[in-house]
Amino acid sequence: MKKILALDSSGLVASVAVVEGDAFGSNLLAEYTVNYKKTHSQTLLPMLDEIVRMTELDLQTIDAIAVAAGPGSFTGLRIGSATAKGLGLALSKPLVAISTLDALAYNLYGTDKLICPLMDARRNQVYTGVYEFCGKELKRLIEPTAVDVKEISEKLCEMKRDVIFLGDGVPVYQKWLVEILLAEFSSCGNQYDFAPAHLNKQRAGAVGTLALRYLQEGKTQTAEEHRPDYLRLSQAERERAEKEQSNRV
């Protein structure tokens, strides 16, 4: 029986969980999730401490530390990454990096519809991908990317299948999505829906459950090796690149 400590601070939500399992199944021992006007620097470590206290968890007994590795908020990813790396170094435990979008899609385990996570990336863009379940396996149909919400909507229309949206980008772009998809989907008989509140945000439980499978497959990394996957440059990096380009011209 393997035990995973999972962290997700990649978006608006902060979440910590402990998951255990083996080849026969998994069990969510504890999960603490907060989505309320607090910075992750204020919430993540106190949540971790509380879970450790409530479950009487000896951190030396965990087998790995799973972390939502991106895409997502640059600050949130750095906080989650630094926390996971610090724990990995202190405890001499491996890390398991899980795509934030993969973990979001895994919330809807077993659906026969397409799954489209949307995370607000600002500048009229979303971090997104398109997924489906083939039996128990989560498959990527469109790899994680940062695109204009109209572009991903058009691709979904071309796929002509029912789809469920989830993620913190939904409330930001829901009205726009409805306007784009309503006519297109109704004309071909397909449907779209939005995941309910208990499934539509990041959950460390999903990160930990996916990490159990990755751990069995040997997909781990050391704390020193781990790097967040930002998918695009930060605003400061973009502005510096634009300035350098203009200077060359």
Image (tube, rainbow, N blue to C red):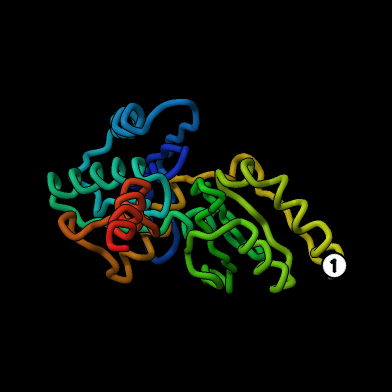
Q: Which residue matches tag 1?
A: 189
Quadrant of the drawing holding the N terminus: bottom left
Image check: 20 left or right of 35?
Answer: left
Nearest to the observer: residue 32 or residue 163: 163
Q: Residues within 10 Å of mark 1 (few under 14, many from 20)?
A: few
Q: Position of residue 193 (x, y in %)?
A: 73, 53
Image check: 143 left or right of 175?
Answer: left
Q: Does the image show residue 112?
A: no
Q: Which residue is found at the position 35% from the left and 47% from the top?
A: 6
Q: Residue furthest front?
A: 249
Q: Secondary structure at mark 1?
A: loop
Q: Position of residue 245 (x, y in %)?
A: 32, 60
8 versus 37 height, above or below: below
Toward which corner of the image does residue 189 lie, by quadrant?
bottom right
Q: Which residue is found at the position 41% from the left and 54% from the top?
A: 71
Q: Which residue is found at the position 49% from the left and 59% from the top?
A: 146
Quadrant of the drawing holding the C terminus: bottom left
* Residue type pointed to by label 1: Gly
Q: Position of residue 174 (x, y in %)?
A: 68, 46
Q: Which residue is found at the position 41% from the left and 39% from the top?
A: 15
Nearest to the observer: residue 239 or residue 221: 239
Q: Position of residue 36 (x, y in %)?
A: 49, 27
